Amino acid sequence: MLAIMNTKLWRVLGIIQKTVMVISSMAILTLVLVQVLLRYVFKLPLMGVEEIATMVGFWLYFMGASWGTADRTHIKADVMQAAIKDPRKQIWIKVFTATLCVGLSGMMVYWGWGYTVWGYTRLQLSPTLMIPMIYSQVSIFVGAILMFFYFVVELVDYFLQATGKKPLEMPGEYCNSPVDAPVIDDVR
């Protein structure tokens, strides 16, 4: 296990991300429930609920994406694992794909920062409730920074594995591998 994964920073980031995901999930659920009740039961639709749900949804999506990156349960296309059976080649392919992920998430950080600055300088407001859009726009930048950080950790881990070091034990990384069931003798 890399030393960084045992640090307080790693644990605090995980707690913050999980907290944001839980709170935003509950907020979206509550907003949708309130809107449905008001609109279809009481016939009194509340304007702007969709705006708030969308803004909260941004935080849910980007914290979820960054947590998937940290937990290494993000979407992967591991087609090469089926085609290439040599473990040494497989780990170097993982190094290559992790390098691409670092590069792409680095570009996302750059674009997210530009979008955040643009949103801040434009002072955009939501159409109905006039809430500053920067509250949701900054989630893209924050999520991109977290994904970049976790992809760098993944790259370092895979590179260390490729050069002969012990792999990290990540929860969820091998969750799709089959488990051998015990053989049960039929006793009659």
Image: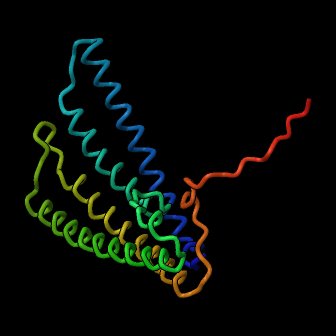
The residue nearer to you, when weighing 45 against 92, is: 92
The percent position of residue 51, horizontal first and vertical second, equals: 20, 39
Q: Residue at x 42, y 58 (%)?
A: 74
- On screen, residue 60 above or below 45: below
- On screen, residue 32 above or below 61: above
Residue lying at the far left of the rendered structure = 122
The percent position of residue 114, horizontal first and vertical second, equals: 16, 69
Name which quarter of the figure residue 96 lies in: bottom left
- On screen, residue 81 above or below 55: below
Q: Residue at x 35, y 37 (%)?
A: 28
Left or right? Give the position of 135 relative to 158: left
Residue lying at the far bottom of the rendered structure = 163
The residue nearer to you, when weighing 69 against 178, is: 178
Name which quarter of the figure residue 165 lies in: bottom right
Q: Residue at x 47, y 80 (%)?
A: 156
- On screen, residue 111 above or below 53: below
Left or right? Give the position of 13 relative to 3: left
Name which quarter of the figure residue 111 lies in: bottom left
